[in-house]
Amino acid sequence: KPLIIHIREASLDSKNILKEYAKVGGVLHCYNANEGLLELADRGFYFGIGGVLTFKNAKKLINVYPKIPLDKLLLETDAPYLTPHPFRGKRNEPAYTSLVLEKMAELSDIEKKELESVILQNTQRLFKGLIGNNN
């Protein structure tokens, strides 16, 4: 089963621990835009992108986002927190992920429908046998 990791103010330590001990990949939930963590993509880790990407002050994440391998990209929510713009400050909910997807498509220069398909495939690959009908 994949690991779900939320790293906060411990990117270097977390990266080193995961490189040494993680036997399976997983999700870097609420990816914090630390470029050093991108090397974990080679170890089966995916990068969860949520509402923060839509924030006006998310310059670091906006700059790092295009460097995330497309086949390691996930769309997520941190509900009830980190609600995307223009609903920031309100309770977050899964319905708002479409706003994040729009921003992701804009930054990726990929059609929203195509990116949605890629993210679905990534999710099914990561959670193979654990969700839906993805054999």
Image (cartoon, rainbow, N blue to C red):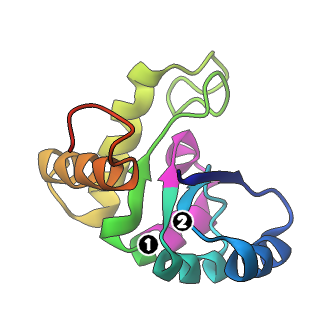
Locate residue 84 relative to residue 134 in the image: left or right. Answer: right
Q: Which residue is mark 2?
A: 25
Q: Which residue is mark 1?
A: 68
In depth, the one of 46 and 133 nearer the eye is 133
Q: Give the residue drawn at x 61%, y 25%.
A: 79
Q: Work out whether 127 lies above or below 10.
A: above
Question: Does the segment drawn in magenta span residue 55?
Answer: yes
Q: Work out whether 21 lies above or below 73.
A: below
Residue 48, percent across and down?
Answer: 51, 52
In depth, the one of 129 and 109 nearer the eye is 129
Magenta-tinted stretch: 48-65
How would you classify the magenta stretch by its main secondary structure?
A: helix
Residue 109, percent across and down?
Answer: 22, 64
Q: Give the residue drawn at x 57%, y 63%.
A: 61
**SS category of the residue bearing label 2:** loop
Q: Give the residue drawn at x 63%, y 16%.
A: 90
